[in-house]
Amino acid sequence: MRVDSERRRCEACGTRTRADWRSRRCVTLLTGCVRLSVQVRVCHRKGCLLEGVSLRAEGEGDWVLPEHEFGLDVLAFIGAQRYREHRSVPEIHASLRHRGVAISERTCTNLLDRYDELISLKLLDSQRLRETLHRQGRAVLAIDGLAPDVGHEVLWVVRECLSGQVLLARSLLSGSEQELVPLLEEVERVLGPIPIVGVVSDGQRSIRNALSHALPQVPHQFCHFHYLREAARPLYEADRHAKKELKKRVREVRKVERTVEGRQDAGARATRAYAAAVRSALTDDHRPPLKPSGLLLRRRLGAIEKSLERVFKRGAYSPELNRLHTVLRKALKATANMWPGLRRAYQWVERTANILRNASGLDSAGVRRRLAAMLAALVRWTRRRYRGVLRQALAHFLLETRRYWKGLFHCYDAPDLPRTDNPLEHLFGTCRYHERRSSGRVRGSAGLVVRGAVRLPAITSAQLLPEIDGPHLAPEDINDWRQLRTQLEQRRVPRVMGRRFRADPNGYLQDIEDGLRRYLPA
């Protein structure tokens, strides 16, 4: 396959270049091996900036990357298998071998990294983002950080809420105000003339300070979900403690279940059915703030107990069912004093959530008045009724409400400003789900932070872009790709150094000392 250059003149001086020689290389495609004959032209004008520089044919980039032997269609296939089909690297390798592509598993991993880099260049291109957002005429930002590894870098992501586009993904050593301000300024430069009408985030202080410095005139909405979760955290802990006490007293259900193993009479079947319902209720955990799993467990076990009482009133009797009923009745009686106050306290959280949901469509002033009136009633109720743990929990609820207060109501006046940043949290959840499906890891890997600037856009490409073939994957400017690879390699170096130190601490430190000794005066 001959690939000829269309550039006949030097880009620096305009002199006609000379077709000096042809570069021959073998490229492996999905359909087989292709031998490329690439025309190379050189400028020989004295004093030219590009004198003697080899200018390869532009069409070569539609087939293969520089210094690579596998074509772009192989990269596109690997990326589609990874991010659309959630295949692991061994599965992708087996699929390629089945197609007759001679490739190693390690090369599949390396080519997957190349796909991440190329697709992120497409998605994060400034011109493309401006054209996409120009049609909607405004931008609403969401910002948050993802930290799979405790104590290491944090992957900070800025996402446009209306279009779902990821504007920026950057790994930072910390989430301080000094590091977040340049991030926001870079996003503002990317958007150019497109106005930012609002920002939504959690209540992290560094994000507040960075936004007040970089975007002082933009309304900053605090996420209602994060607010309720932080405010109701002590209540959630009290609910979890009550659930633990209740679960300890229901452990004998398994013993009752063992007594009917191997039996098929009606009493044994009913006992197994009730025991399965109890174990299902015990293992059904919910997340804060609006679904207290302890109260839910209490309600479900109470329903099972009442069902057993109705069975006994109809005349049915079984020793195993009677024993199961006794276990549940004793457990509920022993923990009966824990639930009324907890149930009443959670009603205040639910009332707060209903006010913030604003089903009646009030403006920010109306919602603020309703919430302030409810909080005043909560203060009076707490002083009269509650003592101990629940009083401290509700006091914490009021304290967190005061801390979040100024940023809770912008969404009722600013158009299209969401109440929560849950879509960005769902994006992080998609990343974790993808990692779990393709690698088996429960938590996000370290590579999600080290290469997060390209991996997270690649993960979102399945929703934002149609399936891309090889030629459309080619970078418009190969130097942008090389620069991106250099930045990612610099990000990887500290991890490599950390592994070397853990493998041989003394040798690692000795190498540092030897290196410094060369530059110290004798």
Image: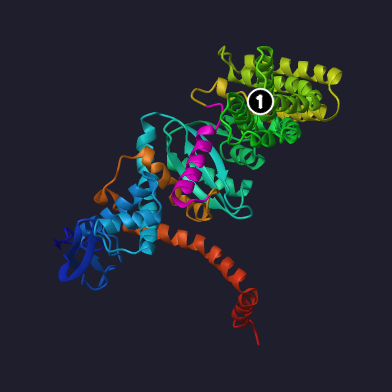
The residue that appears at 41% across and 57% down in the rendered structure is: 484
Nearest the camera: 434 or 356? 434
Q: Can you identify the residue that label 1 sits on?
A: 296
| Number of numbered discs | 1
User: Is 435 contained in the magenta span?
Assistant: yes
- Residue 424 point in image, percent of width and height: 51, 37
**Which picture quadrant has residue 504?**
bottom right
> In the image as oriented, which residue stretches furthest toward the bottom?
522
Q: Is residue 483 above or below residue 507?
A: above
- Residue 475 point in image, percent of width and height: 31, 53
- Residue 334 point in image, percent of width and height: 80, 27
Can I make out residue 480 in this image?
A: no
> In the image as oriented, which residue stretches furthest toward the left?
2
**Which picture quadrant has residue 245?**
top right
- Residue 27 point in image, percent of width and height: 23, 63
| Main secondary structure along the magenta-highlighted residues | helix
Indicate the amino acid at tag 1. Answer: Leu
Nearest the camera: 374 or 246? 246
Relative horizontal placement of residue 408, taking residue 466 as reference (left or right):
right
| Quadrant showing the N terminus | bottom left
The residue that appears at 47% across and 41% down in the rendered structure is: 430
Can I make out residue 84 in this image?
A: yes
Q: Is residue 255 above or below residue 505?
A: above
Relative horizontal placement of residue 270, taking residue 430 as reference (left or right):
right
User: Is 499 contained in the magenta span?
Assistant: no
| Quadrant showing the C terminus | bottom right
The residue that appears at 27% across and 72% down in the rendered structure is: 47
Q: Residues within 10 Å of mark 1 (few under 14, many from 20)?
A: some
Element class at badge 1: helix
The residue that appears at 19% across and 69% down in the rendered structure is: 24
Q: What residue range appears in magenta?
A: 418-441
Nearest the camera: 12 or 139? 139
